Amino acid sequence: MVVVILEYRIDRRSGVPAFQQIVQQTKQALRLGVLVPGDRLPTAKEVAETSTVNPNTTLKAYRELEREGLVEPRPGQGTFVRRTLGRPETGTDSPLYAELTAWMSKAAGAGLEREDVAALVASAMEKQYAAGNVAAAGSTTTGPTGATTTWSTGE
């Protein structure tokens, strides 16, 4: 069994409540295939220790994810992923991800900072997905949520 370590990064300056950031970052992990059905989410205590949020904040986020049918609590075992949001073209092993990573490297090489890149991506997403432009491109891609998440796997 692969153990997925999901480390939530809470940006207290963002104006987005911490529980909502946990929901967004979990959904991002589900879209990217980092989390798959059967994976166990970190306990509220683990999240509190790594992200300095109150355990109740994490429990509130997990309840929201449960209401959406994405996770399920198992008494005495933890909270587990029930279903994914990912599609093959959104995984980190997809050609689109490789192209995006290459573009990000070019942007960093051109001297753009993280905020500059985020603004460009947000602007391009708005232009692409506004007023039904999705069909015009011939393919659909999923962009970043704006929240910072790090993932690693281990045995």
Image: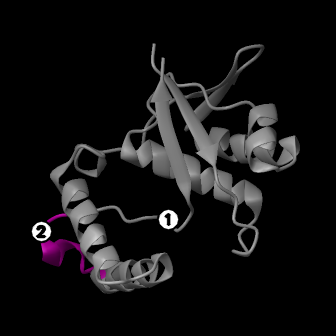
In the picture as drawn, the residue positioned furthest to the left comes out as 138
| 133 left or right of 73 in image | left
Identify which residue is drawn at 28% across, 68% down.
105
Q: Specify the segment rendered in magenta.
A: 132-139
In-image side of 26 versus 108 (left or right) = right
- Where residue 124 sits, quadrant-wise, is bottom left
Q: Does label 1 or label 2 sit earlier along the sequence? A: 2
Type of the residue with mark 2: Gly
Q: x%, y% of residue 94?
A: 20, 48
Q: Are marks 1 and 2 in contact (CB under 8 Å)?
A: no
Can see residue 140?
no
The secondary structure type at the circle numbered 1 is: loop
Spatial separation of the CA atoms under disc 1 and disc 2: 22 Å
Q: Residue at x 47, y 75 (%)?
A: 114
Say which residue appears at 85% left-offset and 41% top-offset. 55
Q: In this rendering, is residue 20 above or below 114?
A: above
Closer to us: 56 or 103: 103
In the foreground, 111 or 18? 111
Amino acid, disc 1: Thr
Q: Residue 2 magenta-drawn? A: no
- Dividing the image into 4 quarters, which one contains the N terminus? top left
Q: Residues within 10 Å of mark 1 (few under 14, many from 20)?
A: some
At 16% across and 64% down in the image, what residue appears? Answer: 139
Q: Main secondary structure of the magenta part?
A: helix
Disc 2 secondary structure class = loop
Q: Is residue 81 above or below residue 21?
A: above
Q: Which residue is mark 1?
A: 145
- Residue 32 visible, this orientation: yes
- The one nearer the camera, 69 or 122, is 122
Label for residue 138? 2
